[in-house]
Amino acid sequence: MKQFALAAILATVAATTVSAAEVASRKVTFPSNGETIVGTLYVPSDTAADTRRPGVIVAGAWTSIKEQMSGLYAKEMAERGFVALAFDYRGWGESSGTIRFKEDPVMKTADIIAAADFLSTLSEVDPDAINGLGICASAGYMADAVSGNPRFRSLSLVAPWLHNRAIVEQVYGGAEGVAKLIAVSRSAERAEEKGSPSIIIAASATDESSLMYQIPYYTEADRGLVPQYDNKFNLGSWEPWLKYDSVATGSRVDKPVLLVHSEAAAVPEGAHAFLGLLKVDATTRWFEGGTQFDFYDRQQHVDAAADAVAEHIEKVLRRQSN
């Protein structure tokens, strides 16, 4: 019976291509480690009360919120027939959290797991057909959350930022540069314990002390610099971020993988190293000329990536239903 039901759902998904106007959205909340996570759920408007569709959890780049690339991709997935959830991690956006604006891989991975638990309870979602989609920094978090987790059926990574120690040192000024940032992080942690968090501007076109100085997307009002964006970064983030080996997650992934990237985007060497560690089936789509930020919101790249994700999920679910 389950196989027949899933086959019927997949037929519905495969036949579904709706416009943005035909996607309903609503605010949702769910718990994660004592905090309240706020998300936006995107559902095809023609979803009948007795229909359970495959679900997709979407998580975005570092410092981002649900009104940026994760929300865009969640809507795109709903247009392709899935129920999709974008959310603010603990301490970011509308979600609660005493510690704010911290890029902590362990915390963020736990929030994705909580999101999967929540999504499995919704009447619109088939709890046996939940999938993960990680963009940029969340690629590692999503890979960790999916690994060994029976909630998930597949993993998709778009423009993944995946690093290891060698890449970290290459990007952040060698071993000496990394050591300095870790020292900054530890000082910030001590200050936060005393009630004085060390917060800087995340992105700026004019402030050279910002985390992302003159970086595209985040500094552009018609792109990522949306009114809801926190645009802040907790300096205590450096140690957990720099010591996080997201490349190594490849050795732990136990779900079929799709990786969408470009050699012109961020740290493609990390993606190649991740793929080299996989012990599961992997599909790759390498696009020519696409920058990291093109994958965040340029419609041509988003459409191509979302189409690839939808195809991957449908293929995986169909294979698992046989």
Image (tube, rainbow, N blue to C red):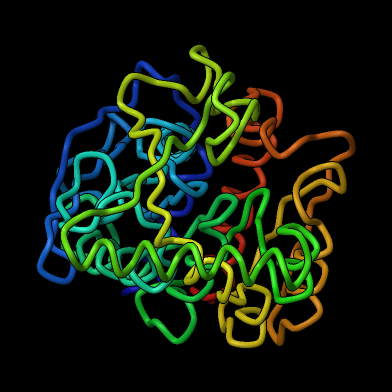
Residue 206 sits above or below residue 161 on the image? above
Which of the two residues, 200 or 148, is positioned nearer the viewer here? Answer: 200
Classify residue 145 by image quadrant: bottom left
Which of the two residues, 43 or 49, is positioned nearer the viewer here? Answer: 43
Residue visible at 58% across and 27% down in the picture? 297
Which of the two residues, 37 or 216, is positioned nearer the viewer here? Answer: 216
Most distant residue in the top direction: 222
Residue visible at 60% across and 30% down in the picture? 208
Q: Residue 91: horizontal and vertical position, in percent?
A: 25, 52
Q: Residue 288: horizontal and vertical position, in percent?
A: 89, 38
Residue 277 sits above or below residue 317 on the image? below
Q: Residue 94: horizontal and vertical position, in percent?
A: 20, 40
User: Which image quarter holds the N terminus?
Assistant: bottom left
Residue 246 sits above or below residue 63 on the image? below
Residue visible at 33% across and 73% down in the picture? 2
Q: Is residue 235 left or right of residue 40?
A: right
Which of the two residues, 85 or 175, is positioned nearer the viewer here? Answer: 175
Q: How many marks?
A: 0
User: Which image quarter holds the C terminus?
Assistant: bottom right
Q: Residue 4: horizontal and vertical position, in percent?
A: 39, 67
Q: Is residue 164 left or right of residue 219?
A: right
Q: Is residue 141 left or right of residue 259?
A: left
Residue 186 sits above or below residue 310 on the image? below
